[in-house]
Image: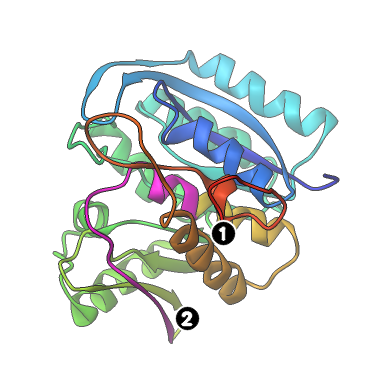
C-alpha cells in the first residue's frame, strides 16, 4: 500500500459507517487510509444516542500531521458535525489545493437521526463544495443544500446544476432514497450525465454513502479518471451489498472487504 487517502469524518460506534467503514473500504482497495477524526457518535443499527464533536484545533492538528509526513493522493470528507470543525477543515485544506477532494455532505443517518448542525450547511456551500472535485449527496441532502426536491432525472439535473454553479467540478446524485426497482446514481460533469444502475435490494443498509465516497476517493488516488472511478465504486458497493452481516436489529450492515478481490472471504462463493 504505497498510496494513501486521508479520511476526514466521524466515528460510528457500531462500525457500520463513518471512519470505521471508510478504513475497511480503503483496505479493500489496497489503499492506506489515514484519518482526521471530527467527532464520535454513540449509535447502533437503529438509533443514534449521543454525538460529541472533536475540538477544531485537534482536527486541524490531525490533518497537518498527516500532510507533514505522508501526503495523501486524495481526500474524502464525511460527517463534520459542527460549524467550527467544518471551518477548521476548510482552512486546513486551503493549504493543499492540489489534492482532489470527494465530499459526502452527511446530514442525516440512515436511522433518521440528524447528524449535523444546521449552521454547517452554509459553510459547506461556501467553502467545501467549491473545493471539491466531486460531491456525493443523496436525495434528501441535495434537497437540503439546493432547495430542489429530487425525485426523478429532471429534478436531479436541476439540483446538479445548482451544485455545479456553487463551484464543484462534478456531482454524483445518489438514488438510494428513491422507490424505483432500479437505483440510478447520476454523475454530472460539465454538460455530461452518466448513469450507473443497480437493482434495489430489500431493506435498508447502513454506511453505503460513506463507502461509496471513500471508494471513489480510493479510485482517484489510484489514478483512475473520474467517470471510471465512480463507475467502479458503484459496482464495488453493489457487490458488497450482496453479502450483508447478520448483526443488529435495525438497518443491515455490509462489509466492503467482501467485495474486494484482494481478500478471500469465507462467505464468498
**Does residue 149 appear left or right of residue 83 in this picture?**
left
**Does residue 229 appear left or right of residue 207 in this picture?**
right
Foreground of the two, 152 or 100? 152
Q: Residue 130: where, in percent of width, then height?
A: 48, 56
Residue at (13% x, 64% y) in the render:
149
Q: Which residue lies under the disc numbered 1?
A: 269
Q: Residue 144: where, in percent of width, then height?
A: 20, 51
The answer to whether 195 is drawn above or below residue 201 in the figure is below
Foreground of the two, 217 or 207? 207
Q: Earlier in the sequence, mark 2 or mark 1?
A: 2
Q: Residue 101: where, in percent of width, then height?
A: 58, 52
Foreground of the two, 227 or 29? 29
Marking on residue 190 = 2
The answer to whether 196 is drawn above or below residue 260 in the figure is below
At mark 2, the secondary structure is loop
Look at the image and tell me in which quarter the N terminus lies.
Answer: top right
Q: CA distance from mark 2 to mark 1?
A: 41 Å
The answer to whether 191 is drawn above or below residue 91 in the figure is below
| Residue 41, visible in the rendered structure | yes
At mark 1, the secondary structure is loop
What's the magenta region? Answer: 192-212
Residue at (21% x, 73% y) in the render:
181
Q: Is residue 177 magenta?
A: no
Residue at (66% x, 28% y) in the render:
63
Amino acid at each position: 500500500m504505497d498510496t494513501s487517502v486521508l479520511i476526514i469524518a466521524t466515528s460510528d460506534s457500531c462500525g457500520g459507517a463513518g471512519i470505521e467503514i471508510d478504513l475497511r473500504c480503503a483496505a479493500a482497495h489496497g489503499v492506506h487510509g489515514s484519518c482526521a477524526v471530527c467527532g464520535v457518535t454513540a449509535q447502533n443499527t437503529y438509533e443514534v444516542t449521543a454525538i460529541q464533536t472533536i475540538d477544531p484545533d485537534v482536527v486541524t492538528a490531525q490533518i497537518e500531521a498527516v500532510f507533514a509526513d505522508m501526503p495523501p493522493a486524495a481526500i474524502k470528507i464525511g460527517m463534520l458535525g459542527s460549524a467550527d470543525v467544518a471551518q477548521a477543515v476548510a482552512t486546513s485544506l486551503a493549504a493543499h489545493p492540489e489534492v482532489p477532494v470527494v465530499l459526502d455532505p452527511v446530514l442525516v443517518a440512515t436511522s433518521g437521526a440528524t447528524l449535523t448542525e444546521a449552521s454547517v450547511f452554509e459553510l459547506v456551500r461556501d467553502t467545501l463544495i467549491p473545493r471539491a472535485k466531486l460531491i456525493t449527496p443523496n436525495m434528501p441532502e441535495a434537497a437540503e443544500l439546493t432547495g430542489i426536491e429530487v425525485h426523478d432525472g429532471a429534478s436531479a439535473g436541476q439540483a446538479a446544476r445548482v451544485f455545479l454553479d456553487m463551484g464543484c467540478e462534478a456531482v454524483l446524485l445518489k438514488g438510494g432514497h428513491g422507490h424505483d426497482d432500479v437505483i440510478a446514481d447520476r454523475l454530472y460533469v460539465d454538460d455530461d450525465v452518466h448513469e450507473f444502475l443497480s437493482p434495489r435490494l430489500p431493506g435498508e443498509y447502513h454506511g453505503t454513502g460513506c463507502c461509496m465516497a471513500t471508494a471513489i476517493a480510493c479510485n482517484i488516488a489510484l489514478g483512475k479518471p473520474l467517470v471510471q472511478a465512480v463507475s467502479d465504486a458503484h459496482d464495488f458497493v453493489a457487490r458488497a451489498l450482496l453479502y450483508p452481516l447478520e448483526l443488529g436489529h435495525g438497518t443491515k450492515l455490509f462489509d466492503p472487504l467482501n467485495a474486494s478481490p484482494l481478500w478471500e472471504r469465507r462467505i464468498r462463493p
